[in-house]
Image (spheres, coloured by chain):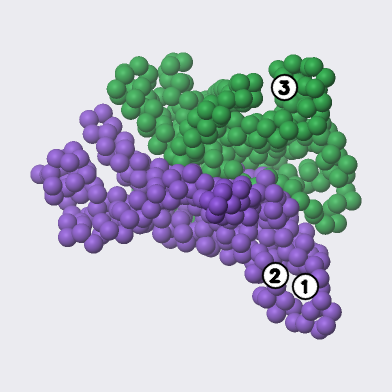
Amino acid sequence: MTAQLAAVAAPTPRRWRPRPGAVVGAVMLGAVLLLTAVVPLLPAFDPMGQDLRAALLPPFADPAHPLGTDALGRDLLSRIALASAVTLGMTLLIVIMNAVIGSTIGILAGYFGGRLEALITLLSNVTLAMPVVLLLIAICAVLRPSAGLTILVLGCTWWVGYARVTRNVAASLRRQDFVVSPLTQGGDTFWVLTRHIVPNIWPHTLIIAATDIATIVLITSSLEYLGLGVQPPVPSWGSMIFDGQRHLGGDPWLALLPGIVMLLAVGGAQFLSQQFTAETRGGLLRKGGMR
Amino acid sequence: MTSVLHRPERGGPSHSVADVLPFIARRLALAVATVLAVVTIAFVLGRATGEPGALLLPDNATQAEVDALNAALGFDRPIIVQYLDTLVGLVTGDFGDSYRLRESALGLVLERVPATLELAFWAFAIGLVLAVAAALAIQLTGSRVLRAVAGWAGAVRQSVPDFFFALLLVLVFSVLLGALPSLGRTSYASLVLPVLTLATGQFVMYLRLLDASLSEQAGQDFVRTAIAQGQRRSTVLFTRMLPNAALPVLGMAGLNLGGLLGGTVVVEVVFAWPGLGQLLTTAVSQRDFPIVQAGLVFVALAFVIVNTAVDVLVRRIDTRTAAA
């Protein structure tokens, strides 16, 4: 009886149900996170130590180096784990910076409107019409490339999506009774913003952030492939693949292994974020102007 | 890498004074503002790393020699004069000479454009044609398997950056099979791998867009009516649904051009393709700012012109946006 009821209730959109893609995504991303968390705890963890006598060992050949070694004899498993931590950490920082900057700008623009909003609309239209990735490459290369610079540049430039959506949501919230009413009764603007506007907006921010993670990983990796980002000897997925490219003929695993880990992380993040977007499809987010 | 540029499309209400201006005038003003912004960024970048004299001359050059070179390149003038000079150069097409090659920077940029356009054009054309074919096949057969396969393959392709997908192609077709060249631009065969890298990314993006558009229309009244009247499914698909789906594709194509050019930069580096991207990345690492400036402005200009044209075109075709 209860089983029958559950079967009937299942198709309703209100009931939370993981999509098969989301489960796969969680497993993929979880595997990478596990690798990142566990490998540094192993006694053999040594991403920097060189051993030229043990250079270019294939995977599974030597128990001391489970995934083999690179051209300088550095342990590949350790380096991949460190690279994952570096790239994922950078991505997280960049996404948080963009989410905070974009949502703040969007809320202020949507709530107050007027000149501020006109300015922000112009600014976001200009950014949308620019070859952003090309500019990022130029900026990161001209100023001395480093992890901090990449975080700063990407963290301050990729917020237009957040600003657009939150602006529209804030503008529609501004007209709602629960916002207008406290204002007419002499309520404090700051109080209304923090109590009524922000709690209704951060779910939207979170959804964009979830879809943005994959995008940011791909951009930072591309920059790192071009040598713009984390500098050696600290590894990153992009720079490891660049280094491995030279050995594609004889030792392809050098480029393949970090690439596969990246595929797991990015694919996992994308499948997981589709769960969020699917659930809110047709809801407020649509009205917010995202397609 | 193309997926990287998938950002929310423009849209939503704007309440600026500019709303009263005619649409095209507003769009042109935006184009000018965008190009100005890019020029300004390029200018600031060029000045942020200091004067070029010390960078270009050997280490044992005297201060007097450095100063003389800076003066010869115009770096001794007030910064505002230099900026205005750059803006004048933008209008006259004079971006100065390359520091290293002593040749017109714009000339060097234009020399590389055909190679880049070749990659971008074929990637776009092949990706789009295959996407249309696949979307039509999914609609005509109504096959769930086909859609699932396309969906999962697309998700995997979008989960790896262009440079890694390119390496996979090189590994299979150059290293293992020895069938295709992996470097340079020597024959039509060397076009295959870079184009394939970019085209697969384009394919996934357009297939998603087309499939969403066609599937949405499939449930609508005008389609059901046409089929109920006895029209064949394929006729309805080709004459009614496909033209409607062309509009979002057109809009996406304009916005995506920047992504395609950005992706081309990385792919050119992977395949040592002698295009604009390779020129720019080299110039950037050599601090050859006239080339960087000319290249960035050229790309921005191309991007803005295509985007403006697409916007105007979409607005002319789509009566819904014209009314807004």
The front one of B192 and B228 is B228
Disc 2 + disc 1, Cβ < 8 Å? yes
* Left or right relative to B70: residue A242: left
Location of residue A14 in the rendering, given as x and y in whole percent from the top left corner: 63, 55
Q: Colour of chain A?
A: purple
Look at mark 3 in the image and give the residue it sits on.
B237
Location of residue B269 in the rendering, given as x and y in whole percent from the top left corner: 42, 35
Please say whether residue B131 is visible from this viewpoint. Answer: yes
For residue B237, which quarter of the picture?
top right
* Left or right relative to B88: residue B97: left
For residue B296, which quarter of the picture?
top right
**What residue is rendered at 78% in x and 42% in y?**
B28
The front one of A8 and B256 is A8
In the rendered structure, which amino acid carries the disc numbered 1? Val
- Name the mark on residue B57: none
Look at mark 2 in the image and give the residue it sits on.
A197
**What residue is rendered at 76% in x and 62% in y?**
A171
**What residue is rendered at 26% in x and 37% in y?**
A253
Q: Chain of mark 2?
A: A
Q: Chain of mark 1?
A: A
Disc 3 + disc 2, Cβ < 8 Å? no
Look at mark 1 in the image and give the residue it sits on.
A179
The front one of A50 and A201 is A201
Q: What separation in Å lies between label 1 and label 3 (alpha carbons)?
A: 47 Å
Structural crowding at the residue carrying mark 3, measured as other residues with C-alpha within 10 Å and reported as few (<14), some (14–19) or many (≥20): some
Q: What separation in Å lies between label 3 and label 2 (alpha carbons)?
A: 45 Å
Structural crowding at the residue carrying mark 1, measured as other residues with C-alpha within 10 Å and reported as few (<14), some (14–19) or many (≥20): some
Location of residue B246 in the rendering, given as x and y in whole percent from the top left corner: 72, 29
Q: Which callout, 2 or 1, points at the residue further toward the start of the chain? A: 1
The image quadrant where one finds the C terminus of chain B is top right
